[in-house]
Image (cartoon, helix red, strand yellow):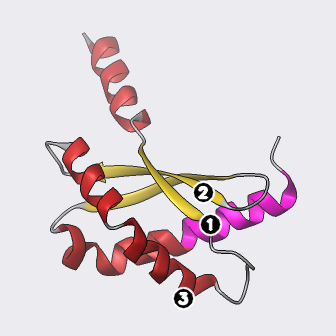
Amino acid sequence: MDSTRQLKVSRLIQKELGSIFQKDAQSLFGSVMITVTQVRVSPDLGVAKVYVSLFPVKDKEAVLKLIKTKTAEIRKKLGNEIKKQVRVIPDLMFFLDDSIDYAEHIDKLLSK
């Protein structure tokens, strides 16, 4: 169970990363819409696991790899946004959230 502090920091990071991806995704990643679906922060607030959903993309793994190569730049932008609210800017680890794809797959199976 996450502590109240972890939940607050998670929501803050999710909100700010969402706005960063909304503003800068065009210049960094092309015409990809990136949605931050979930953020989980470690108990020491040093590591944040960020789950992203990508749309409309054929090769999601390639875009995720591109996001991972730009992690330092994204973390710096995040740090500029939240430096007054947290002591340490957490290290970011990006993962692909495939829950939407899974839901679509189940929906297709049920509609048959």
Q: Are marks 1 and 2 in contact (CB under 8 Å)?
A: yes
Q: Secondary structure at mark 3?
A: helix
**Residue under pointer 2:** 48
Percent x, y for residue 102? 38, 27
Q: Amino acid at mark 2?
A: Ala
Which quarter of the rendered picture does the N terminus lie within? top right
Residue plotted at (34% across, 13% down) = 110
Magenta stretch holds residue 5: yes
Of mark 1 and mark 2, the one earlier in the sequence is 2
Q: Residue at x 23, y 44 (%)?
A: 60
Question: Label 1: which residue?
Answer: 90
On the picture, is 44 further left or further right than 36? right
Q: Which residue is outermost to the right?
A: 4
For marks 1 and 3, the one nearer the N-term is 3
In this view, which residue lies farthest toward the top? 112
Q: Secondary structure at mark 2?
A: strand
Residue at image x 71%, y 66%?
A: 9
Q: Nearer the viewer, residue 61 or 56?
A: 61
Work out whether mark 3 precedes mark 2 in sequence or the reverse, and give the earlier one. 2
- Residue 70 image position (x, y, % from top left): 32, 67
Considering the image in quadrants, where does the C terminus appear? top left
Q: Which mark is residue 23?
A: none
Mark pair 1, 3: CA separation: 13 Å
Residue 80 image label: 3
Tell me where the magenta segment starts and ends, as one range: 3-15
- Confirm or deny contact between disc 3 and disc 2 (CB under 8 A): no
Compared with residue 64, is residue 98 higher up or lower down, i.e. above or below?
A: above
Magenta residue check for 59: no
Q: Is residue 27 left or right of residue 4?
A: left
